[in-house]
Amino acid sequence: MESRIIFHHIPKTGGTTLIGILDQYFDIEEIMPNRYFDKPARDVTSEDVEAKAEAIKTYNLIRGHFPIPCFDNIGDDYYRICLLRNPVSRLFSLYNDWRSKTEQSLSTAHPLDVKASRLAKANNISDFLKHSDYPIPALFDNGQTRLLSDSLSKKSIGEAELIKAKETVDKMQLVGITEMLDSFLYTLCQKFKWVFPKQYQSLNTRKYDRQAMTTIDKDIFHEFLKFDLELYEYVISKFNKTVVNQLKAKNNNSQIKRHQVNHISLDMLKGFKCDGFHVREGIGGDDVWRWTGPDTESHLYFNLQPHIDYNLEIDIISVIDQEIVDNLKLKCNGTNLKIENKGAVNGKQRVSAKIGRDLINVVEEDKITIKVPFTTSHAAVQPETKDDRQKGIAITKIEIKASSDTIQHKEKEGKPLKKFFEKLLS
């Protein structure tokens, strides 16, 4: 089944983390670029999409803060998904996000966003929510209901918008909640036969300014959340049924015919089956890389032809601490590999190892493990970066190819049999 997904990202629901995970399953050319419409995603209209419909259909992954209706007519072959979050947590998180925006990020922001950020910085949460200037009501006043009912511009909303939001949920293929992100991911992975990401790091998080949140007016709080709370409970009930049905379904992975290969060459522009990698970086430059992390083990999954010896090469463009590379370990299907060579190739560190034929699975897929002794962050050595993602090594390329000796040996083995059949058929 071809994976074709539209992810409607509601702000502060864990969408940035989910996008980072989704992106790894697709080649870069399959993903619709950010700012594709030369305007903020929330300002994109159905007319904008219609004007570029044929080009848009070439992308298999569309994700962003787009209004729900703008992709209604793009085609029925997309699997439309969305995440909601506990409305109380989301309200505080959204307010905190506005307070935490840096002057650098505001320098390129929409004037209305700049105004809202200034108000958030200058007011506690209760006083902030009393402002009626856009985009405060649109994002904070039952914002999830507004987004799912296409009611951002309305001064106030009611039961009609709640009903419409529920109808939107019913029309989508999968709507989950942030608090059950693992179950949401599991459902997607079962649907599209992806590797479940056993490890990932939450992105776009902020530290809370608790003092600014201690004075919350309960009446305002209730008014700003009453529809979102009901919508959230509706989604929980619906999603729980999806999870139960998923667990009841039989896993037919063992019946999938596996296409085995003897040469794999991966640059980081490609999507591949893996676990334990951060998002792509360097897009548009000479090299694209992905850091391993946040844990010390990262895994890649392949279907290699059995009874063949292989050479494994990994090109590393960057590392925060050289000790990480010096103590790197590689495994194939759980067995440690002897690292044969570490040297510089085209300005990168290349790590090589041999994989013996006795390590290759005959039926099950093969797992290559990259294990680093520890992970660290750029923020630990350069606090000004504010990048606290735990990283191991930054990889630009991974290549696994059958050794020339093996190929020559197999050719010699095959020649007598070939001659026998040629003689038999002549």
Image: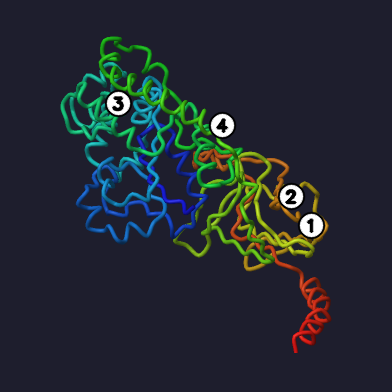
Q: Going from the N terminus, do you reach mark 1 or mark 3 first?
A: 3
Apparent side of residue 100 relative to residue 301 in the rendered image (left or right): left
Of all residues, the one furthest to the top in this rendering is 218
Spatial CA span between label 2 and label 1: 9 Å
Q: Residue beneath label 1, please? A: 339
Q: Going from the N terminus, do you reach mark 3 or mark 2 first?
A: 3
Circle 4: element type? helix
Circle 3: element type? helix
- The amino acid sitting under disc 1 is Ile
Spatial CA span between label 4 and label 3: 44 Å
Residue beneath the point at 29% across and 61% down: 54
Q: Residue beneath label 4, please? A: 247
Spatial CA span between label 2 and label 4: 37 Å
- The amino acid sitting under disc 3 is Ala
Name the mark on residue 328.
2
Q: Going from the N terminus, do you reach mark 1 or mark 4 first?
A: 4
Tell whether label 3 touches label 1 (CB within 8 Å): no
Tell whether label 3 touches label 4 (CB within 8 Å): no
Apparent side of residue 38 relative to residue 351 in the rendered image (left or right): left
Residue beneath the point at 37% across and 17% down: 213
**Mark 4 vs mark 3: in front:** 4
The quadrant holding residue 350 is: bottom right
Tell whether label 1 touches label 2 (CB within 8 Å): yes
Query: Would you call the spot at circle 3 few (<14 residues within 10 Å), some (14-19), or many (20 or more)?
Result: many
